[in-house]
Amino acid sequence: MAQDIIKKLEDKGLDAGFAVNNRGQVFCGRESVAMQSEIAQMATVIFETIGAVGDLSIDRIQIIGGSKGVIAEISKDKMLGTFLNGDDFDSVNSIFAVLEGLIDVEIQGEEAAKKPEPVVEEIEPVIDEVKKPAEKPVVKPIEKTVEKPEVAVEKQKVKLDAGILDTMKSILKDYVGDFSERIFNNQLKAQRIKSEELYDEDARRLIFALGKAAGMIIGPSKGRDMTNKLLAVLK
Amino acid sequence: MGDLEKLDNIPGIVGYAVVRADDGAVETVKGSSTASVGDLTAFFSSAGEVIRDSLNLGDIQYISICYGNSRLVIFTRGAKYLGVEIPRETEPGELIKKIEATEATEPKVEIQLPRSISSKLQQINLLIDEFGGKENKNHWLALLNQGLGILGGDLNPYVGNINLKFEFKDNPPAEKEDDFVQALRSIIDFLVKKAVEEMGSSQARAKVQAVIEKMR
């Protein structure tokens, strides 16, 4: 399946595309295959950094250098991206549109043999470099043990009834009163949640964002209490 | 780096952080962003350096990360990284051009606010003066930013604290007037609620009354 995605990217002219699945396997297009181990390193650094910053749902990254760049769509521990040359910099949005359309397709790992064996050894020094406290003391959370991408089978997304949002809004109102409408709508927008297409992971993200926002009005302990009530709605 | 205060005047900037490139220390965080823009800038500038070296990308023009409805653009200014949060739909290149233009010249956008908005703006500034006085004004401006972060929504790229005053940096679109008035009203309620918590209801009420008198 991952090779199908790479093929689709190549069909769209993205020959330097790459995909990293939730097992850490890397799949490359014809122009990026020589960079396979560097892509694996990059993916690890990005996933570790996202892990270090906590509960923020980062779904897109661009690193644009002098004449080269790399962009990627990120979905949990999966990544789909491509290298860019200077000529492509103006087309970033259309390239992202292609990547966004494909990222949710399961990047299967049936071609495990394609995983470059020395990757782990090569990644460790890179991670160590990020971890060096002398260079970046602020980057403390990265000092956590390097966790390999989970081997477990990816959890299926569960679609929820949009009515659950009304229940959540009503609980929010019990805690923050008249502030509820604005907080709810702002967070819905901030988290890019579509009420007509609500999944369990979106609802969880929304709940924690609402809890954090409400905590600024009613205090952190009541905010936590409300978060727990909202989480109970999902059970 | 040019005067950081100039960033406060640039429309579209929700918040920003300055991080030292040599040791990753966060020097400044400003604005109403609800994300930890200081930590994000520190972490991703560090990660970007590692990736740049590994992939031979050359000097980094910028790093952009998107989360929710927001985008953080990280780029270097001298020996520092600047991480600027903007709405997701804003192009990073557009932001950098705006900042460079501001550094080169002093922009002067003439702000014309509808009365419904300007009166709320005035009320907020008077409340902050009244609640904070001279000694505690920064605390109340921080609370204002907190309120904006959770209640401001689309208003946030248009407003900011400029020279210790809450102001509009750009003219609000006409179709957003009602929404912005609602947002400002909520923020007033938020500030009053905080005042009640911090100084008790009778003192807070007296200060709100003083503001009402000043607005007459």
Image (spheres, rainbow, N blue to C red):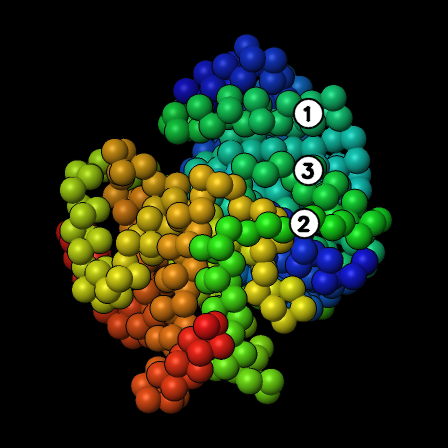
Instruction: Give the residue number, with chain letter if any, for mark 2.
Output: B110
Image location of residue A228, percent across then percent down: 22, 63
- Locate residue A118: give its quadrant: top right
Image location of residue A50, percent across then percent down: 51, 51
Instruction: Give the residue number, with chain letter if any, for mark 3.
Output: B94
Quadrant of the image containing the N terminus of chain B: bottom right
Using the image, name the chain to which the residue with label 1 belongs.
Answer: A
Q: Distance between the residues labelled 3 and 2?
A: 21 Å
Q: In the image, is residue B203 above or below residue B15?
A: below
* Amino acid type, label 2: Glu
Q: In this view, does A86 lie to the left or right of A52?
A: right
Instruction: Give the residue number, with chain letter if any, for mark 1.
Output: A90
Residue depicted at 73% across the width and 58% down the height: B6
Residue B64 visible in this rendered orientation of the protein: yes
Between residues B49 and B113, which one lies in front from this camera angle? B113
Few, some or many C-alpha atoms within 10 Å of disc 1 (few <14, some 14-19, many ≥20)? few
Few, some or many C-alpha atoms within 10 Å of disc 2 (few <14, some 14-19, many ≥20)? few
Dots 1 and 2 on the same chain: no
Residue depicted at 76% across the width and 59% down the height: B80
SS at circle 2: loop
Residue depicted at 34% across the width and 41% down the height: A193
* Amino acid type, label 1: Asp
Using the image, name the chain to which the residue with label 2 belongs.
Answer: B
Between residues A116 and A146, which one lies in front from this camera angle? A146
Q: Distance between the residues labelled 1 and 2?
A: 32 Å
- Callout in the foreground (1, 3): 3
